Amino acid sequence: MILKNYYFYYINAIPKSLCNDIIKEGKLHQPQPGLIGGVTGKDGKQIQNTQEKLEAKRKSNVSFFSFEWIYKELHPFVKLANENAGWNFQWDYSESVQYTEYGPGQHYDWHADSWHQPYKPEHRNPDYRGKIRKLSMTLSLTEPEEYEGGNLEFDLRNDKDYDFEKGSSKVLCTEIRPKGSIVIFPSFIWHRVTPVTKGMRQSLVMWTLGYPFK
């Protein structure tokens, strides 16, 4: 799919005081090592990752929570980005937000947030059933001078201007660095967080859901 915009951003969109409140809430929910979901083999069964394989792909600590005040703060940015970027995806629900901590040596290698199939019809949450992730949002909770590394990068090889001879489709998203900044992108876009080399990178991630594209 060729897009006019592969991501949309707002710099210093959320007050730092609110970012600090989100960090406190994330820590209250006791972050645990992040896992990888939605990965299946050719037989359709879930692939069981060993700890070694998991940490090679993803190493971070996360916690989840769901409060109306957070969605009230973030949804307007998602709606506006969806319109201004020209995506106009139909979505009607957001998953629980994910608070993430990346310490030294922690990272999340190349991945897309959307899966190869919708959430199952028997999902315990009826608002998930039959839907897919449409838009992903990342909110920076940390001052840029508080950590090194931990860069958000996109792989835009589907871009019409991609230079195949040059062979590099990576784009560094510098706009997300300032605390309180937001970046929003289609959930099928491949991206990664490079290893943190010093300090800690904290962020909040949210995914919006809608029925599959037609």
Image (spheres, rainbow, N blue to C red):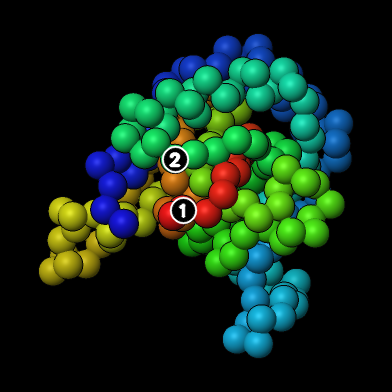
Q: Are marks 1 and 2 in contact (CB under 8 Å)?
A: yes
Q: Is residue 208 in view from this perspective? A: yes
Task: Please name the residue shown 28% across and 47% down the image.
Answer: 3
Q: Label 2's element? A: loop
| 92 to the left or right of 69 | left
Task: Please name the residue shown 36% across and 56% down the image.
Answer: 155
- Picture mark count: 2
Q: Please identify the quadrant where the N terminus is shown.
A: bottom left
| 167 to the left or right of 20 | left
Residue 201, picture quadrant: top right
Q: Nearer the viewer, residue 170 or 188?
A: 188
As drawn, 7 above or below 19? below
Q: Which residue is mark 1?
A: 213
Task: Please name the residue shown 58% across and 12% down the image.
Answer: 15
The disc labelled 2 sits on which kind of residue? Answer: Phe
Q: Label 1's element? A: loop
Q: Nearer the viewer, residue 199 or 100?
A: 100
Q: Nearer the viewer, residue 146 or 39?
A: 39
Counting residues from the start of the chain, the first of labels 1 and 2 encountered is 2
Q: Nearer the viewer, residue 63 or 116?
A: 116
Residue 122 in the image, given as x and y percentages of width and height: 80, 59
Q: Which mark is residue 89?
A: 2
